[in-house]
Image (spheres, rainbow, N blue to C red):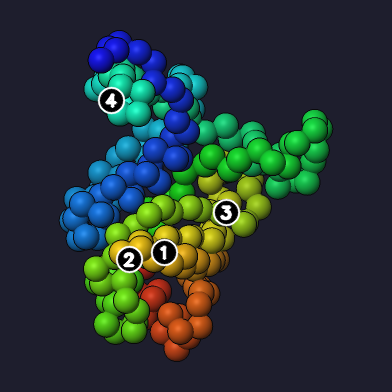
Amino acid sequence: RNTGAWLGDVAASDALAAWEVLRFNRHHGKDPTFEKNWTTLRDLLYMPSYARVLVPRTPGVDVKRNKIGWWRIVLPRTAWIGERKKGRAHAAGFDDLPSDLIPDQPWAYRVASIMRTNAEFLGTTFASCDLGRVSYLPTARPRHLEPGRVFREVDVTTEFVCEARRHLVTVSLKRVDGQMTLTGPRGLVSGRVQWWNDKLRSGS
């Protein structure tokens, strides 16, 4: 096995999203330390300051390529989302630049945990399902010195894998002046908005 190799680059936002999936599946959405640990790691990776790229000292394994080495964590490029939200297109393909900012809370983990632990109440079949992937699409406008403000409005998508079937569930969160509103599939959210708001705030 080849050791000491550079395994590649991974965006910090992708790394944290993958961690949400890993911890959810390992602890069935009931890890009491996850959100605190997630916040600690986010504080390290959220905004570039003295470096653009960080390399964890713990080596990783790339099974497909039979290599042991290190992944480089690429910190968010805050200018990308600011310029794109302004509707500018200074270069070909500018509108296709990814949003690589990290949300202020692990909303996908929280939404998925609520749906799994309250499956009977919600009338879903997610009680024994794993997460396949999660994604975030911020929809608010950024501010120059506060790019993370885009997550005041965000679409959170969770993919549940139940045996051979996959279910995509997207909920939209909007926070204004401390108030949170949520929209999503009618059978999941309709008539339960306040219940969802309380659960999302408490993280249970």
**Location of residue 104 in the rendering, given as x and y in whole percent from the top left corner:** 43, 50
Check disc 4 and give the amino acid type: Gly
1 or 4: mark nearer the eye: 1
Residue at 53% in and 46% down:
148
Task: Return the residue nearer the eye: 191 or 1.
Answer: 1
Mark 2 crowdedness (10 Å alpha carbons): few <14, some 14-19, many ≥20: some
Question: In the figure, 140 relative to 95: above or below?
Answer: below
Question: In the figure, 198 relative to 130: above or below?
Answer: below
Q: Which residue is mark 4?
A: 60
**For the residue labelled by badge 3, is the local secondary structure a helix, a strand or a loop?**
strand
Residue at 63% in and 48% down:
142
First-in-chain label (2 vs 4): 4
**For the residue labelled by badge 1, is the local secondary structure a helix, a strand or a loop?**
strand
The answer to whether the residue labelled 1 contacts the one labelled 2, judged by CB atoms less than 8 Å apart, is yes
Q: Which residue is mark 2?
A: 162
Mark 1 crowdedness (10 Å alpha carbons): few <14, some 14-19, many ≥20: some
